[in-house]
Image: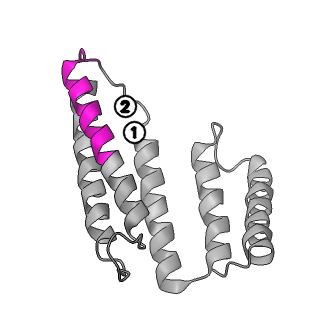
């Protein structure tokens, strides 16, 4: 695939996302008073800066030579994106953050494991997923008091 075309498409998508983000920041609560800093001030600065940087990168991409992009593991990327979408959909509809996080991390570990999936390493991956989920629980629930 052409790297130049791919870069240009991604930059246009980023500009569209930043424009939407800018539009959302204008809908935040406005404070009374001229020139006061409200809740949307910083998001507007971020989105405008991001749009300007994307436009600069677009011009640089247009001037650059074309190159080829190897998409050898695109199936792994697409499966990861699909698993992430399913994870967020299940979490937002049913809750159960910690069990879903455990299953999500275990499935990603199994997906990216270079050896066959169901070997004796599945126990190690389960322990790793469980320990990371417990770590997330303690950091967010106990230390920062964030409820999921």
Number of marks drawn: 2
Residue 44 is drawn in which quadrant?
bottom left
Majority secondary structure in the magenta region? helix
**Image spot of residue 100 (x, y percent):** 61, 72
Name above or below for residue 45 compared with residue 35.
Answer: above
Q: Quadrant of residue 57?
A: top left
Tell me, yes or no, whether the highlighted magenta stretch contains residue 54.
Answer: yes
Residue shown at 80% from the left, 72% from the top: 143
The structure residue drawn at horizontal position 37% and vertical position 31%, both measured from the top left corner, is 71
Residue 88 visible here: yes
Q: In this view, does 55 lie to the left or right of 140?
A: left
Q: What element carries label 2?
A: loop
In which quadrant will I find the N terminus?
Answer: top left
Q: What stretch is highlighted in magenta?
A: 50-67
Res. 145 image quadrant: bottom right
56 is higher (above) or lower (below) than 124: above
Q: Which disc is residue 74 wearing?
A: 1
- Residue 110 horizontal side relative to residue 25, left or right: right
Is residue 38 found left or right of 15 in the rendered image?
right
Q: Is residue 1 visible?
A: no
Q: Is residue 116 above or below residue 47?
A: above
Using the image, determine if residue 121 lies above or below residue 60. Answer: below
Q: Which residue is drawn at 38% across and 69% down?
A: 40
Determine the residue positioned at 44% across, 35% down: 73
Q: Residue 135: percent from the left, percent from the top? A: 79, 64
Residue that lies at the very extreme toward the top in this rendered image = 65
Q: Are marks 1 and 2 in contact (CB under 8 Å)?
A: yes
* Mark 2, residue position: 71
Foreground residue, 110 or 97? 97
Asked if the stretch drawn in magenta spans residue 137, the answer is no
- Observer-nearest residue: 3 or 126? 3
């Amino acid at each position: 695939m052409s790297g130049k075309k791919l870069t240009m498409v991604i930059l246009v998508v980023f500009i569209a996302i930043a424009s939407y983000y800018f539009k959302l920041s204008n809908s935040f609560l406005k404070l009374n008073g001229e020139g006061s800093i409200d809740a949307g001030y910083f998001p507007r600065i971020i989105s405008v800066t991001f749009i300007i940087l994307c436009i600069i990168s677009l011009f640089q991409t247009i001037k650059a030579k074309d190159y080829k992009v190897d998409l050898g593991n695109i199936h792994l990327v697409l499966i990861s994106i699909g698993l992430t979408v399913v994870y967020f959909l299940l979490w937002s509809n049913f809750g159960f953050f910690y069990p879903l996080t455990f299953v999500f991390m275990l499935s990603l570990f199994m997906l990216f494991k270079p050896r066959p999936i169901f070997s004796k390493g599945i126990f190690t991956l389960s322990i790793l997923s469980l320990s990371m989920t417990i770590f997330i629980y303690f950091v967010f629930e106990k230390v920062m008091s964030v409820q999921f």
